[in-house]
Amino acid sequence: MTAEPIDGAAPATPAAADAARFKVGGAYAWYVLAVATIICAFSLFDRQVLSIVAGPVQAALHLSNTDLGVVFGAVFSVFYAIFGIPLGKLADGWNRSLLLAIAIAGWSLSTMIGGLATSVVVFALARSGVAVGEALANPSAYSLLSDWFPRKQRATAIAIYSAGIAFGLGGSFWVGGKLQDLWHSLYPSGVGAFGLQDWQAVFLGIGAPGLLVALWAATLKEPPRGLSEGVIQPNAPHPVKAAVAELFAVLPLTCQWRLWRLGARPKEVGLSLAALVLIGLAVIGMTRFTESLISTPLAPLFRLGAMPVTSHGLEWATIGLGVAVILGWVQSLKAADRPTYSLLWGNPQMIAMTVASALYMTQTYGLTTFSAKYAITHFHASPGEVGAKLGLVTGGVGLVATLFGGWLADFALRFSPRGRLYVSFGAMIAVMPMAYLTFAATSLDQFFWTYTLLSFSTVMWLPGVAATGQDLVMPRMRGAAAATYNLATSMFGLGLGPFLVGLVADRTGSISRGILTVYWLSPLVWIAMFILVKGLPTAEATRLERARAAGEPV
């Protein structure tokens, strides 16, 4: 299929022609889903492989557990947050198939650059490149699949796509561990061809195949936007320009300038600037507080001129920037796109879903970042053994749980409009007791048996929540809805989870205690889910009415 010009999209085709060329839920739709699932798996390959090589990376780059948590989480999440919103806008206005190809090519190259890094600065910049690529992929895939599949199959489709997470997580552990053991068998000193260490070979081996998948993604057909619901909406006339404008709409200071140009009152702009000052003060305060929890002096990760920057300072600066980005985006969205603001941020159910997802993923990312290192060090196991077993658990069980969660969510929907969320809520309740059972294990085999049950509960929640988020907005807003979800789960889930686990682990000398600490967020997750479940039927029933009231031309 010939792609639209990047800065000018063709108008929607007539409905009859669309029906003849694109069959919603047909064979080609399932083919697109298969390719998208593979892309999803590769995104987790590149993001998560750091977990299985954490020890060698820490040794080579001289990182503490807290430092590792910051590089793994906050550095990744801040770029994901900053670019997730404008790239979600781009996914709502241009060819999503080509965007997927660009995304995977970008993060694959960044992963390979990370494998060549000799300093924490270069490694962190490479992680940021992976983040930008992933920030583009998920909104594009969610929006694309929502047009290829009808509402009654949407949770199943998203569940299958999300199963790529399980493949990616499992594959990163399995392949990463096996490559490490293979490298050491070939080069007992750990340094091999071209002077590469084992962890560097892993990053290069994981990144390179993604370039071929990018070429494959570029061949996918692009359906008309809104096809699955019969509400055909044209692409944006200037999608790149709109995405750049969206980027400036969320960055601190440029956001306030844009608000002024959009006609915001001086009081509103002043309050927005005051919020930036408060965020800056909070960053300084939180940095000093968490640094005071560590008894030994902290070595800087790098220096900005003469100023040393510790992992704590970088962590809270990135979280502060993320908060500023979110506030800026919400203010700009309210001024520039009232219908999207109304359905995303003017809806208590969307807010509750976002909060629940962010807190829940704080637990998940804390768990998955340090589980492999915990098993290797606590049970004195090899990376290959741990990688193979963790890969089997996170890949196999994660796949089954995700697919089962999607099927069960769609099945439960037949009996109640809240059915999907009942499934997700149940999984979110189960993880806390399962986490405590897992880290009470006294042998490696026992650990993996209980970790299997924990993994099942950990991933089963996603299809019901993700499908609900897509149903609560109009078709043209689905990329923005996915970007909102990704923003929350990455900025706070990924941004805070690994850091908090690393901080507690450094302070107590116990990785397991660090992991279990984040599960005390569970009661807050349950409260947010209760609010979402309670108000869902009304929110879905009034979606079109609220969109029209906000000015949406439907």
Image (cartoon, rainbow, N blue to C red):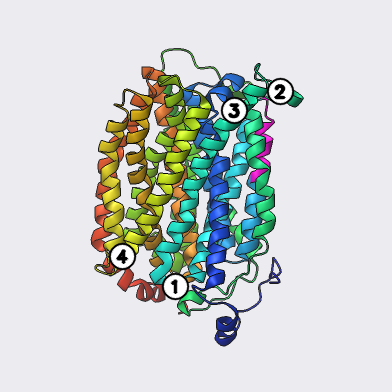
Local SS, label 2: loop
Pick whichever of labels 4 and 2 is earlier in the sequence.
2
Pick whichever of labels 1 and 4 is earlier in the sequence.
1
Pick whichever of labels 1 and 3 is earlier in the sequence.
1
**Amino acid type shown at disc 1:** Pro
* Residue 112 included in the magenta stretch of the image: yes
Distance Cα–Cα, label 1 vs label 4: 15 Å
Position of 44 compared to 2: left or right? left
The residue at which mark 3 appears reads as 180
Numbered label attached to residue 192: 2
Q: Are marks 1 and 4 in contact (CB under 8 Å)?
A: no
Give me the residue at 36% from left, 18% from top: 508
Name of the residue lying farthest toward the bottom: 16
Q: Position of residue 510 (x, y in %)?
A: 37, 20
The residue at which mark 1 appears reads as 150
**Amino acid type shown at disc 2:** Gly
